Image: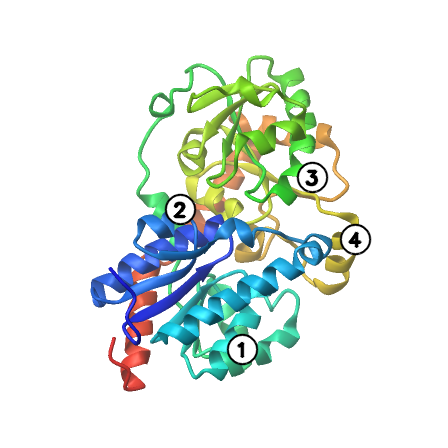
Amino acid sequence: MSLKSGRNFLISAGELSGDLLAADLVHSLRSLSPDAVAYGIAGDAMTRAGVIPLAAISDLSVMGVVEVARKISDIRMLEQLILTWVDRFNPLFAVLVDFPGFHFRLAEQLHLRRIPVFQYVAPKVWAWGRKRVDLLRDHFTGVLGVLPFEEEFFLRNGVNYKYVGSPHFDRMSKIQLDASHLGLPSGQKIFAFLPGSRMSELKMILPLMDRIRHEILREVPNALCVIPLAAGLQWEDVAPILNVDPDVRGKSQSWEASGFHWMNGCSLELLKIANSAVVASGTATLECALAGTPMSVVYVMNDLSYAVASRLVDLPWVSLVNLLMNEEVVKEHIQVIDPVVVAQEVVTLAHDSVARKHMLQRFELLTSQLVPGAADRAAAWIMRDLREKGIKV
């Protein structure tokens, strides 16, 4: 496919989770408009879905006040690159997936060019940055959300919002396997560790998870502690964080290093068969709940970023599981963390305990409240809105 002015659309994602969501949405949009060509900031999944990449998601994959400040000039240049293509090829519409820090600025420029802009995955302005609600209302044609509890907030604030369902539910429901499919040994307790997908996160969280691993092994000496390396991350960049020789991996798809069993991707598959998990706060907490794997949630960030976030965020919890259920279903350990406490929690949850049974019951209730078919519903909503505006896609 080639780009033709007026017969294309822009789609942009800023991190791995957004890449997967965007790829699913592109497939759904193509089923309704086979000739439309997509281009934008893309990851591997979007590229496989046929999106023409103008830049890679890794160019945007930073988080926190300090981390973003260090790359601000690169981000501005990337914004100008995207707008140059927009001015040249005049997209029929744009879809911006999550990642509001960058996408809010881009949406303003697209709105000035009278291009309909749809936000897929509503930014968490109900948690912090409530002043941004005005920007959502003024610069976005529509907001397609994936969390049912936020609908009342956005509609009350005049945002053209639609809850389209849970893409994480859709993805997890397709996975059927056991430990043998992943090449993991049987007869051992499996503890999954999900440290996130950004290098800025890994530098803070991996050393903590290593200390938790040590404590788990005191309680369960033959435990198998597994980390799925997120797509887009290079082992050569991750290994120095744990003072491991990068060459230990070789060409294998799974390897042992620093006491962990590492895998290339397969995070959802791992969650399906793990006995319990230690998860960095984010969408992975929801995926873990949908997999039916008990967890403890941890998160550490730069001290300055944490200080700023603490002033801005006014929520009782940070994990999506607790927010969706409006109660403390999973324990959250943020910034100042005792590895012994976390290890004791996940060991208890890995066995047939009262705590495990209670958590799994709450996970089942959460799952029953989510709606499938998010990508198809989002694509249909976009197309319907464009038709109402007289735009033929």
Categorize mark 2 by other alpha carbons within 10 Å: few (<14), some (14-19), many (20+): some
Residue at which label 1 appears = 108
**Amino acid type, residue under disc 4 in the picture:** Leu
Secondary structure of the residue carrying numbered label 2: helix
119 to the left or right of 311 = left
Q: Which of 286 and 358 is in front in this view?
A: 286
Could you give the CA–CA distance between mark 3 and mark 1, rounded to whole angstroms?
33 Å
Could you give the CA–CA distance between mark 2 and mark 4, rounded to whole angstroms?
32 Å
Secondary structure of the residue carrying numbered label 1: helix
Categorize mark 1 by other alpha carbons within 10 Å: few (<14), some (14-19), many (20+): some
Residue 46 to residue 249: above or below: below
Which of marks 3 and 4 precedes in the sequence? 3
Number of the label disc, if any, that sits on residue 365: none
Q: Which of 313 and 317 is in front in this view?
A: 313
**Amino acid type, residue under disc 2 in the picture:** Asp
Q: Residue 340, can we see it?
A: yes
Categorize mark 3 by other alpha carbons within 10 Å: few (<14), some (14-19), many (20+): some
Number of the label disc, if any, that sits on residue 44: 2
Quarter of the image with the N terminus is: bottom left
**Amino acid type, residue under disc 1 in the picture:** Glu
Residue drawn where x is 33% and y is 25% of the image:
181
Among the 4 quarters of the image, the one containing residue 316: bottom right
Q: Nearer the viewer, residue 17 or 191?
A: 17
Number of the label disc, if any, that sits on residue 204: 3
Could you give the CA–CA distance between mark 1 and mark 4, rounded to whole angstroms?
28 Å
